[in-house]
Amino acid sequence: MGKVQGKLIVTKILIASSFFCLLQCQEKKQESRNLSTKNNTMHKTEISSILEEQLKKGAAEEYGSFSNYSEKDLNALIELEDSILQSNGYKNITNDQFAAKIEQIFGRKIDYTTSNNFLKVDTYNKCDKELSFVPLSAEYQNIYISKKYKLLSYFYPLPLLIDYQKSYPGLRKIEEVPIEVETNEGRLKVNRWKDIPNLKEQQKKNTQIVVARNMYLFNDNKTYVTWLVTQDPTFVKTLVKQFGYTKESKFNDLTMNDYLNNYQTSSDIGDVIFTKNCNGKLEIRTELLKYIKEHTKSDENRLLTALENFGYALKDNNSFTPDEKYKILAYIGNTVDPFYLNFAGVNSGNAVWNAESVLYNSIVKDRNIISVFQKNNYYDLPDLKDSLMRIQGIIEHSSE
């Protein structure tokens, strides 16, 4: 009897303990939900405060509306963008994964030990790494990389991203008052955000840009490739031309076709393929050379001709050392010369083929090229040795 009573007591204690634990767990969950709600409310309050200041300053960049923007404005923007991305299925990646992506795409290293929350990528000058907080404009097209949220963005004013009249209706009254500034021409009224034509369309487009860029670059979501090519082509071409991001074939397609449409056979094509990094080291974008090779035919050789023209202009190019010029010529020769086996002297469609290649004509003028290529083991280029043998045979035959 005593044993039974003891078991009952133990059972009651276990039930009571379990019930107590259940209550505690429920309280903790509720506490967590309350904290989350409190944080969201706090964030919304902070964003509302920053948005209010931006609305008061107006939308007139030329009259200083953006002059007092700072890191807190960018922080508010990034928090909003993070919410937008999460609602679109953005998958968080690790710090190491994000750092690897940023280095691969922009050639920049993320240091998580520093207090800086952002990296600034200047799309006009990739070597300008000084961190400054300047909103998007025609003059400043900086990309800001958030270490905390692991995303990238232009520095948009908040009214260019969200439908603030719908999300923050209490702030509508701010724009009921005209915004006036003192100028040399006297006191002028300047644009409020609500005065911007097609503002809602801009907000929608900018939101799509944020989603598409981050989902593609950091989540490897290929469904956004076509949208980026058709709707965000300037960014795509900047990735390829400025930063050498050539792993996406459709991005290369856009860039090279754009070059062909605008420049035809101009030697400027070499400036996209043969570049210097921020340490002054030569970089060769082999994917673009491969593109030229794959898109050259008997009746279409304009990109190849442009590449040859860069080779001919190389001797007067002061951006490269003599050794770098030899290496560049080797890569050009490896791409160009094999076509001359079949098409030298042919004119067909969009193709005008010279009697000989730039590699041949360069060697005729500088026989030292042969020994340099040999000393460098032909730069491990698959067709260069055969091309050199072909050219040597022609030269020896013509000298007999």
Image: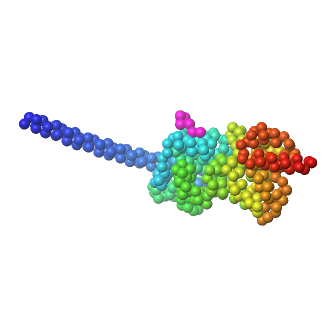
Residue 60 magenta-drawn? no
Where's residue 30, x and y in %?
A: 32, 46
Q: Residue at x 48, y 47 (%)?
A: 92
Q: Residue furthest right?
A: 400
Relative horizontal placement of residue 175, taking residue 185 as reference (left or right): left
Q: How many marks?
A: 0
Of the pair 80 and 305, the residue shown nearer to us: 305
Image coordinates of residue 181 in percent, x first then y, are: 61, 52
Q: Is residue 294 above or below residue 364?
A: below
Q: Judge from the rendering whether residue 344 lies leftward or rightward of residue 159; answer left or right.
A: right
Q: Residue at x 61, y 53 (%)?
A: 248
Residues 141 and 371: in front is 371
Location of residue 345 in the rendering, given as x and y in whole percent from the top left corner: 84, 59
- The N terminus sits in image quarter: top left
Residue at 66% x, 57% y is 253
Please tell me which residue is depicted at 92% across the width and 48% down the height of the picture: 400
Give, as a single range, the part of the protein colored magenta. Answer: 109-115
Residue 66 appears in the figure: no
- Decide if residue 106 is on the left or right side of residue 394: left
- The main secondary structure of the magenta stretch is loop
Comparing 7 with 344, the one in front is 344
Residue 114 belongs to magenta span:
yes
Vertical side of 107 occupied by 89: above or below: below
121 or 69, nearer to the observer: 121
**Residue 168 x/y as whole percent:** 46, 55
Name the image quarter holding residue 9: top left
| Residue 293 visible in rendering | yes
